[in-house]
Image: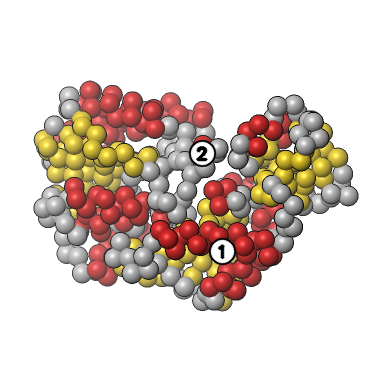
């Protein structure tokens, strides 16, 4: 007998508003019996049907709702959802400028816990819940029917899978996937390692912010911190006098150098080191730059870590502001949902005050539109980019 989850009184409001998650502590009772990861129906305390989603008793998120009417779960529904997500991306991007993007963004595209990224003729999946992982072949089938890809790869090395009782594993799901895939972003060629690179191989959410940064790099000496595979560095290099790309990872810097060669750039130099220490060393050397980009990894992945993260962000932004030449620019990013825009702006203001610099906000940007955010689910809005002029 399928599971039937009855919510406590009042707990349905958030979900009726568009949120997908039903937390275990929001359920008054669970009726029926089925396999973990199976489809469960969710009802309000008054008996009203709320929706259907995959259940997992091992997770704090008991059910992730993705059916709100009487649609039948199955390969056809998955195909329809993926096709609808693709229709949006076709409107967003010109194939001449981009052939890599997030095809499907989980909750925001009505498929909670499923992420699909496209890299030219290849697709990379992340299955972040038990129910989705058990049905990943439906995604493979849909992608094959819609796009005739050369290969589909699963990046299952995300820690959140362990909370779902899933193993950490990367595996080929269809066709062949090479070690390196050359893609096109903002008219540039980028070599992406989908098997070993961060996330699914590349940070696709910054594509439009990388393009926007070009205007602040004209004839400039640029410092790109936490450069990863060089997305900001390469876009800066289209206009800059010189770019110094800094990262602690030798693997990342090799990728930057490879991408620089791929595009014929000779104005990019790499520097391996801890960014916090590098910025302090530059200050001691009285080094300065016209434009500095700070795009660190998430400093906090839970609310409990926010205070420490705040100090970390303040440290690097204080140091960067000290290094920006008067009239120059600071591009400061945070990809942590828990570092809210208000808190991030407060940190930037405090950093400027401590550094004795005056900061003017020129732009406030968010994640690229292939990573849409649901107004009803604040968790889907996470990336903040402040572009400041420093005097």
The residue located at (58%, 66%) in the rendering is 171
Looking at marks 2 and 1 on the same chain, the residue that comes earlier in the sequence is marked by 1
Q: Quadrant of residue 98?
A: bottom left
For residue 375, the mark is 2
Q: Which sits in the foreground, 233 or 272? A: 233
For residue 373, the mark is none
Q: Is residue 179 above or below residue 360?
A: below
Residue 196: x and y in percent read: 46, 61
The answer to whether 279 appears left or right of 65 in the picture is left
- Quadrant where the C terminus is found in the figure: top left
Residue 355: x and y in percent read: 20, 26
As measured in the structure, the alpha-carbon distance from the residue carrying label 2 to the one carrying label 1 is: 22 Å
Q: Which sits in the foreground, 52 or 382? A: 52
The residue located at (52%, 34%) in the rendering is 302
The residue located at (47%, 37%) in the rendering is 337
Q: Quadrant of residue 57?
A: top right
Q: Is residue 190 above or below residue 52?
A: below
State yes or no: discs 2 and 1 in contact (Cβ < 8 Å).
no
Say which residue label 1 marks: 83
Q: Is residue 234 visible?
A: yes
Q: Is residue 157 visible?
A: no
The residue located at (20%, 30%) in the rendering is 359
Q: Is residue 391 above or below residue 196?
A: above
Residue 275: x and y in percent read: 29, 42
The answer to whether 48 appears left or right of 135 in the picture is right
Q: Secondary structure at mark 1?
A: helix
Residue 217: x and y in percent read: 17, 50
Q: Quadrant of residue 340?
A: top left
Q: Is residue 355 above or below residue 37?
A: above
């Amino acid at each position: 007998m399928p599971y039937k989850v009855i919510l406590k009184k009042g707990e349905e409001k958030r979900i009726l508003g568009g949120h997908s998650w039903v937390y275990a502590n929001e359920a008054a009772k669970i009726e029926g019996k089925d396999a973990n990861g199976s489809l469960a129906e969710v009802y309000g305390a008054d008996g009203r049907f709320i929706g259907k989603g995959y259940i997992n008793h091992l997770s704090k998120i008991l059910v992730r709702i993705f059916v709100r009417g009487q649609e039948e779960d199955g390969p056809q529904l998955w195909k329809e959802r993926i096709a609808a997500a693709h229709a949006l991306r076709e409107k967003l991007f010109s194939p001449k400028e981009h052939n890599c993007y997030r095809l499907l963004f989980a909750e925001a595209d009505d498929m909670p816990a499923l992420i699909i990224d496209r890299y030219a003729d290849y697709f990379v999946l992340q299955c972040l819940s038990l129910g989705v992982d058990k049905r990943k072949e439906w995604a493979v089938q849909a992608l094959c029917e819609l796009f005739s890809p050369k290969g589909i790869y699963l990046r299952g090395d995300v820690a959140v899978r362990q909370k779902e009782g899933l193993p950490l594993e990367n595996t080929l799901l269809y066709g062949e996937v090479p070690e390196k895939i050359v893609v096109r972003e903002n008219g540039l060629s980028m070599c992406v390692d989908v098997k070993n690179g961060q996330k699914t191989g590349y940070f696709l959410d910054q594509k439009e912010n990388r393009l926007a940064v070009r205007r602040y790099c004209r004839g400039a000496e640029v410092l790109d911190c936490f450069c990863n595979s060089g997305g900001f560095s390469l876009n800066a290099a289209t206009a800059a006098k010189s770019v110094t790309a800094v990262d602690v990872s030798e693997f990342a810097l090799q990728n930057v150098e490879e991408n620089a060669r791929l595009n014929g750039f000779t104005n990019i130099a790499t520097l391996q080191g801890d960014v916090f220490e590098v910025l302090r060393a530059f200050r001691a050397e009285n080094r300065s730059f016209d434009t500095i980009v700070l795009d660190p990894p998430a400093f906090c992945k839970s609310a409990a870590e926010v205070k420490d993260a705040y100090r970390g962000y303040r440290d690097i932004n204080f140091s960067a502001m000290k290094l920006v030449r008067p009239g120059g620019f600071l591009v400061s990013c945070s990809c942590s949902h828990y570092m809210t825009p208000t808190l991030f702006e407060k940190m930037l203001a405090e950093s400027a005050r401590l550094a004795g610099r005056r900061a003017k906000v020129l732009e406030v940007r968010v994640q690229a539109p292939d990573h849409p955010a649901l107004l009803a689910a604040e968790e889907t809005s996470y990336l903040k980019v402040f572009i400041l002029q420093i005097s």
